[in-house]
Image (cartoon, rainbow, N blue to C red):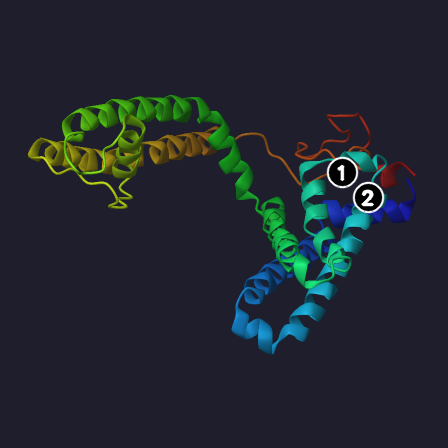
């Protein structure tokens, strides 16, 4: 790989160097600015008064993201690894809609145009790449997914039972419990303490059971939080493997161990400029 490509790769894909950190900070600012523009564009009063400014600013940001997208492609040996990766697809989805708007002309297409422009909100997903603690959270969620899955299954069974019971109790009343699925919907809404109020029990027994479900809901909501928190604390206590932001210049694989010299995925040297 040419020396300039190695340098470009180091700046774009890594955050352990001053240049890489600066690049990430600038990119974060651009992402937040683009999200703010999308939000302001949805406010009719602001869009009417400052439509030209919003359009120019969006074009500037789109062009900068386009340059970043192609820079990521040319700085690795296997561009398809990035193009078809999760972040590669997100980067493309967050950039293309503005260009597509040039080809959609006419009042009939205004609805489609708005839908395409809303796709730019995908840029918010680019933020996850630069949040270091997100890796720890994802590991904690992954480690506790079985426990959470069992818990959700238990809740679904509980809501089915409670909904069926409430249907038996309230079906003769004009309370909205017209079927078991609708009663299960009520049980879910009540157990999660959302409480839309579109269905409400009228009998004394039904109201008593509803009260128990409401109180039970407060305790149930805390369970998944406790599971993830405990697993998160467990991850910290183990210490884990010390990883850095080193990205393979060949296949773009990340999460290498500190002081690693070769990519765990393809075996490519992680520091080609040192061997030139």
- Between 108 and 136, the one lying in front of the other is 108
In the picture, the quarter occupied by the C terminus is top right
- Between 241 and 103, the one lying in front of the other is 103
The disc placed on residue 41 is none
- Between 46 and 236, the one lying in front of the other is 46
Give the residue drawn at x 55%, y 64%: 42
- The secondary structure type at the circle numbered 1 is helix
Q: Label 1 to label 2, Cα distance in Å?
A: 7 Å
* Residue 4 image offset from top left, x and y in percent: 89, 49
Choose top left, top right, bottom left or bottom right for residue 186.
top left
Q: Is residue 150 left or right of residue 98?
A: left
Q: Is residue 274 left or right of residue 22?
A: right
Give the residue drawn at x 46%, y 34%: 236
How many numbered markers are drawn? 2
Answer yes or no: is residue 38 visible.
yes
* Residue 240 image offset from top left, x and y in percent: 54, 30
Q: Is residue 93 left or right of residue 178?
A: right
Q: Earlier in the sequence, mark 1 or mark 2?
A: 2
Q: Circle 2 is placed at which residue position?
A: 73
Asked whether the residues under the numbered discs 1 and 2 touch, taking CB atoms below 8 Å apart as contact, a structural biologist would say yes
Answer yes or no: is residue 95 visible.
no
Q: Circle 1 is placed at which residue position?
A: 82
């Amino acid at each position: 790989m040419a020396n300039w490509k190695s340098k470009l790769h180091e700046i774009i894909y890594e955050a352990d160097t001053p240049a890489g950190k600066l690049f990430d900070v600038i990119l974060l600012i651009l992402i937040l600015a683009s999200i703010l523009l999308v939000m302001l564009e949805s406010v009719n009063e602001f869009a009417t008064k400052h439509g030209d400014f919003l359009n120019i600013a969006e074009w500037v940001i789109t062009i900068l993201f386009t340059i970043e997208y192609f820079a990521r492609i040319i700085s690795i040996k296997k561009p398809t690894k990035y193009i078809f990766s999760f972040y590669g697809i997100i980067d493309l989805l967050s950039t293309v809609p503005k260009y597509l708007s040039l080809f959609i002309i006419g009042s009939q297409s205004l609805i489609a145009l708005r839908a395409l422009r809303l796709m730019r909100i995908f840029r918010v997903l680019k933020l996850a790449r630069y949040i270091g603690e997100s890796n720890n959270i994802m590991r904690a969620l992954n480690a506790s997914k079985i426990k959470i899955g069992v818990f959700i299954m238990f809740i679904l069974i509980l809501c089915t039972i409670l909904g069926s019971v409430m249907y038996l109790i309230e079906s003769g009343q004009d309370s909205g419990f017209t079927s078991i699925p609708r009663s299960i919907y009520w049980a879910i809404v009540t157990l999660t303490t959302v409480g839309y109020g579109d269905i409400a029990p009228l009998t004394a027994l039904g109201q008593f059971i509803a009260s128990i479900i409401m109180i039970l809901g407060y305790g149930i909501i805390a369970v998944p939080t406790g599971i993830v928190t405990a697993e998160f604390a467990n991850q910290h206590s183990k210490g884990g493997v010390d990883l850095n932001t080193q990205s393979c210049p060949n296949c773009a694989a990340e999460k290498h161990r500190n002081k690693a010299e070769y990519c765990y995925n393809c075996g490519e040297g992680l520091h080609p400029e040192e061997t030139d």
